[in-house]
Image: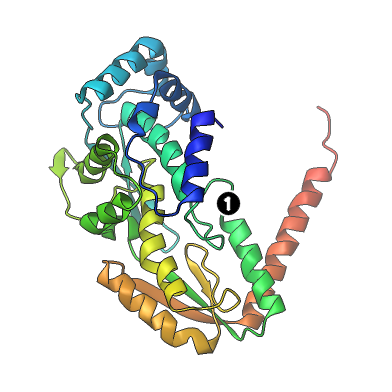
Amino acid sequence: MCTDINRIAELAKEDPKRQFFSIAHLITVEKLCEAFRSLRKDASAGIDGVTYEQYETNAEENIRQLHQRLKKGKYQVQPLRRVYIPKEDGKQRPISIPALEDKIVQKVVVNLLNAIYEQDFLDCSYGFRPGRGQHQALDEVGRVICRHPTGWVLEIDIRAYFDSIVRSALVEMIEKRISDGSVLRLIQKWIKVGVIEEGRLLVSETGTGQGQPISPLLANVYLHHVLDLTHLRHRIRRQETILSGHVDVAHRAARPQLQHSIHVARQHGCLLSHRLTDRLHCQQQKERDADQEHDKREAQLVPQKIT
């Protein structure tokens, strides 16, 4: 990690209320190049049709010009390209694909903001965070179930979360930490940009555009203020509620506080669906998953015939 990023992280950790008013200058040519190299080479192109391979043929000059546009305030966000991918329930999930240069700039900004917000996010939050994921979340859920008297698991899912975020509220939350006008303007451009679907430009009043590199971080900032801090304010102990991005493990005694959290989330545009699962069912599912993982590992150890 770069020294300047380390310093930002240190300052953010030292003072949870510190506002960062000058970080845009850290969007350098070098960082833009690193962001470009980190992109998937086979990723779908945005609305401009520019692929990684095409951009790479003159990457140094392209990135230099991109950096100049950013410095002079001439950088323009391109509309997102809307595609749909199938969900497990048979429905279609809309994904917005940004242009390649927008991906590059967003990845640099994400790295800068992660240095700040990783100091703020709760330790029991796992979704869309560096070095964390659903497997660690499930491990923590299993640990709590095994060590504490838990009768039921309450699973909460936010419907169409990326499309439901109230932008004005999101910006207010970001401004608690970021006061750099250049960075705030970039974020505003990204969340307000429209999408192209079947040749038409569609503009919505809510959401962050699922599929953009910046969207998961912005979604986490929103969820941190709407849900995580709400739990803390109501003093729900860690052994009673484990937040993992989409899953809550709770005692029946915590239900009033959870109902309040659901109410607060709805006030911020987030519609929740939930279900109760008994602990025995969860344990059986965990054992099945462990057996499948064991069988998979054994299959990998079977000698292959040489042809």
Spot occupied by residue 194 in the image (x, y as percentages of width and height): 19, 42
Instruction: Say which residue appears at 75% left-offset and 63% top-offset.
Output: 291
Residue 21 visible in the displayed image? yes
Coloring basis for residues = rainbow
Please determine whether, in this image, residue 44 is positioned above or below residue 137.
above
The residue pinned by badge 1 equals 132
Please, what secondary structure does the residue beneath circle 1 have? loop
- Dot 1: few (<14), some (14–19), or many (≥20) neighbours within 10 Å? few
Locate residue 292: give its quadrant: bottom right
Residue 90 visible in the displayed image? no
Locate residue 70: give its quadrant: top left
| 70 to the left or right of 85 | left
Spot occupied by residue 178 in the image (x, y as percentages of width and height): 33, 45
| 76 to the left or right of 23 | left
Instruction: Say which residue appears at 48% left-offset and 56% top-offset.
Output: 121
Spot occupied by residue 164 in the image (x, y as percentages of width and height): 27, 60
Instruction: Say which residue appears at 32% left-offset and 23% top-offset.
Output: 50
Please state, as top left, top right, bottom left or bottom right, where the C terminus lies in the image.
top right
Spot occupied by residue 100 in the image (x, y as percentages of width and height): 34, 28
The amino acid marked with disc number 1 is Arg
Please state, as top left, top right, bottom left or bottom right, where the N terminus lies in the image.
top right
| 266 to the left or right of 146 | left
